[in-house]
Image (cartoon, rainbow, N blue to C red):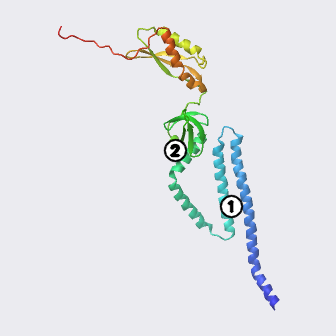
């Protein structure tokens, strides 16, 4: 009689045990396959950036992570469903929590969105000299939230991407060859042609000034006390500042040696004697 009761108890709980065992086994299979698919999806997205060198790997690593965690979220929901958990309420709760977090992190999310746009359209890259958000420097790092600049006095400036995107960005390193604008004035009594020859000679002898395209040297303005030249030599981008800060001194010395006056601003005052 006792043996019959024991068999009856086993038969009573055996279907439930088999059901739980099946659910656990299926859940483990779903979890393993889901993790494998998520990993493959991440690697596939990152591989796109590695295959095309012009694409930014930081952006595709971010997209890969989004794809991976999205897949894992669905895997988690599928696993919970196997155990009879009502996931509709969980999804609604996660949605409400996501909305609350999004409202609390509006600034961070705007930086993230701007970072994605910067990495997609690539108006600048690491190593470029840029003017952005009122700051000038060399780009040392671009991530999803900030752009980091290094200034000439070796300061590090961290700029939120939302302050850069949507504003004017000047990329000084976009073109290999750059023009360097500078202005020089000579007295009205001096010869324009002689001054131009002196300036052309200085530019021709400068090691970093290119002959093609040829330097631009022309009279720009007839000022109050001087005839002003616009001088625009061209150089490779890496020599821009070497040219900018060396040519003015060389031209000043050359004009002095040629006896060509560089006037300082002055006014002529005419006194009229009204008694006469």
- Residue 178 visible in the picture: no
Mark 1 element type: helix
Q: Residue at x 51, y 12 (%)?
A: 254
Q: Residue at x 74, y 69 (%)?
A: 24
Q: Nearer the viewer, residue 230 or 34?
A: 230
Q: Position of residue 55 (x, y in %)?
A: 66, 40
Q: Which mark is residue 162?
A: 2
Mark 2 element type: helix
The residue furthest left is 275
Q: Are dots 1 and 2 in contact, CB under 8 Å?
A: no
Q: Residue at x 49, y 21 (%)?
A: 182
> Is 85 left or right of 167, judged from the image as shown?
right
What residue would you read off at disc 1? Answer: 75
> Is 258 left or right of 214, judged from the image as shown?
left
Above-or-below relation of 185 to 145: above
Q: For the C terminus, which image quadrant?
A: top left
Find residue 205 and report its image quarter. Answer: top right
Q: Residue at x 51, y 18 (%)?
A: 249
Q: For the N terminus, which image quadrant?
A: bottom right
Find residue 3 and report its image quarter. Answer: bottom right
Q: Is disc 1 surrounded by few (<14), some (14 to 19) or many (20+) residues within 10 Å?
A: many
As measured in the structure, the alpha-carbon distance from the residue carrying label 1 to the one carrying label 2 is 34 Å
Above-or-below relation of 61 to 261: below
Q: Position of residue 115 (x, y in %)?
A: 57, 44
Q: Position of residue 114 (x, y in %)?
A: 55, 44
The residue furthest bottom is 1
Find residue 238 and report its image quarter. Answer: top right
């Amino acid at each position: 009689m006792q043996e019959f009761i024991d068999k009856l108890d086993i038969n009573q709980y055996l279907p439930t045990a088999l059901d739980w065992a099946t659910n656990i086994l299926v859940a483990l299979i779903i979890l393993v396959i889901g993790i494998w698919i998520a990993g493959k999806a991440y690697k596939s997205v990152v591989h796109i950036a590695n295959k095309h060198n012009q694409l930014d790997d930081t952006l595709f690593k971010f997209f890969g992570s989004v794809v991976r965690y999205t897949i894992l979220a669905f895997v988690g929901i599928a696993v919970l469903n196997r155990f009879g958990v009502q996931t509709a309420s969980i999804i609604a709760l996660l949605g409400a929590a996501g909305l609350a977090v999004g409202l609390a992190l509006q600034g961070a999310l705007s930086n993230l969105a701007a970072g994605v746009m910067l990495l997609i359209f690539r108006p600048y890259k690491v190593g470029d000299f840029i003017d952005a958000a009122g700051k000038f420097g060399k780009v040392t790092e671009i991530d999803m939230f900030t752009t980091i600049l290094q200034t000439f006095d070796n300061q590090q400036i961290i700029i939120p991407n939302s302050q850069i995107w949507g504003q004017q960005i000047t990329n000084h390193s976009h073109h290999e060859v750059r023009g360097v604008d500078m202005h020089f004035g000579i007295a009205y009594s001096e010869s324009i042609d002689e001054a131009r020859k002196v300036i052309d000679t200085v530019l021709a002898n400068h090691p970093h000034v290119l002959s093609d395209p040829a330097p631009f040297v022309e009279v720009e303005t007839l000022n109050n006390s001087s005839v002003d030249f616009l001088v625009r030599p061209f150089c490779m981008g890496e020599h821009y500042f070497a040219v900018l800060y060396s040519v003015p001194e060389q031209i000043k010395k050359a004009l002095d040696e040629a006896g060509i006056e560089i006037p300082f601003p002055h006014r002529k005052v005419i006194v009229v004697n009204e008694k006469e």
